[in-house]
Amino acid sequence: MEVIVVDNEQDGAELVADTICNLVAKAPTTVLGLATGSTPSATYAELCKRSEFGLDFSRTTVFMLDEFLGLEPDDDSLYLNSIRSWFTDPVGIPREQVHAPDSCTQDIARECKEYEEKIRAAGGVDLQLLGIGRDGHIAFNEPTSSLGSRTRVKTLTDQSRWDNAEGFNARQAASQALASSIDEETRSTWQPDPEQVPLHVITQGIGTILEAKHLILLANGSHKSDAIAATVEGPITSMVPATALQMHPHATVVVDQQAAAKLQLIDYYQAIHAAKIHLQPRIT
Ligand code: PGA
């Protein structure tokens, strides 16, 4: 596993955007595996900026990691709708090439199976972008998920619902404020409500994720430092699902200073990066 410690979130976003741009420039039909959540949003903003300078994403295919169950197809909180507005629509990836598990269908078991088949039929994921939960989850594979799991329905932990509540609350607050002209000050006092976050999701399994050719896990902030230390330096365990990355032949962890703060070998990772020779792989 390669660990790259960057100064701040924006540097990490630029590095990952460089990697994605190089890949798409070399192979326009690249298959990207994408994550939502707050962590990759700066990367998507960076990619949108770069597409304005002419990089063509129109032949790129996208597979999302996961999706909430129980929301309406036009709900802004669906990850498919988020990625369309943050990244794939602005850079011109046709919607028929952007896939997420369809959580609105009647036959969810069949959808999970077909999602796996769709990824395979596309030739597999070339580059999978991952965030990490503070408990070490990847996608929505919560602690104790099987390290060999495939796409399926999972139940979120209370922590994950809390961590996602802000987005749900902000959207609801915004729409109510629009409807009834509630002022900014009142809106800012509303608290996140985890009950608004669905309890169930469809998520790619850890076994599914490990089949991508290159994994890049991004993390920022001190609230991720325990999870990052366990992921990089701890024993492989389903209690910290991200430790499965230790079994992948090409996994890169890009962390800011705060998220890297509890890594014991941080000086070594920085020395490796500073002394790379041409025989060693590079992220970009
Ligand atoms: P975050 O979520 O990017 O919003 O911190 C990461 C995750 O839960 O995987």
Image: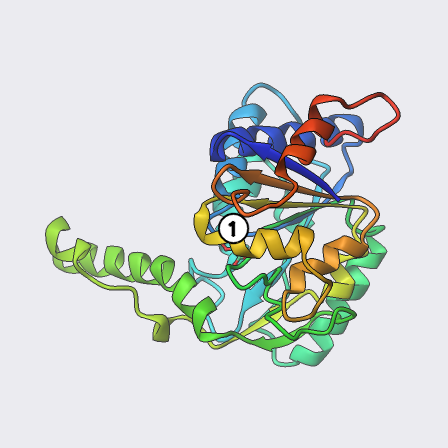
Task: State the residue in front, 240 or 110.
Answer: 240
Residue 192 at x, y percent in the picture? 29, 64
- The picture quadrant where one finds residue 25 is top right
| Residue located at (73% from left, 77% from top) | 110
Q: Is residue 162 above or below residue 270?
A: below
Decide if residue 178 is on the left or right side of residue 225. left
Q: Quadrant of the N terminus?
A: top right
Q: In x, y percent, where is residue 54?
A: 62, 20
Count every numbered label the image shows and give the total.
1
Position of 191 compared to 122: left or right? left
Task: Give the percent coordinates (x, y) of residue 275.
Answer: 75, 22
Colour scheme of the picture: rainbow
Residue at 58%, 61% in the rendered image: 136
- Disc 1 is placed on an element classified as helix
State the image quarter where residue 198 is shown: bottom left
Front-lying residue, 227 or 235: 235
**Image x and y of residue 15, in percent:** 61, 29
Q: Is residue 168 left or right of residue 235?
A: left
Q: Which residue is mark 1?
A: 225
Farthest residue in the right direction? 279
Q: Is residue 195 visible?
A: yes
Q: Quadrant of the C terminus?
A: top right
**Please, what is the three-letter code of the amino acid marked with disc 1?**
Ser
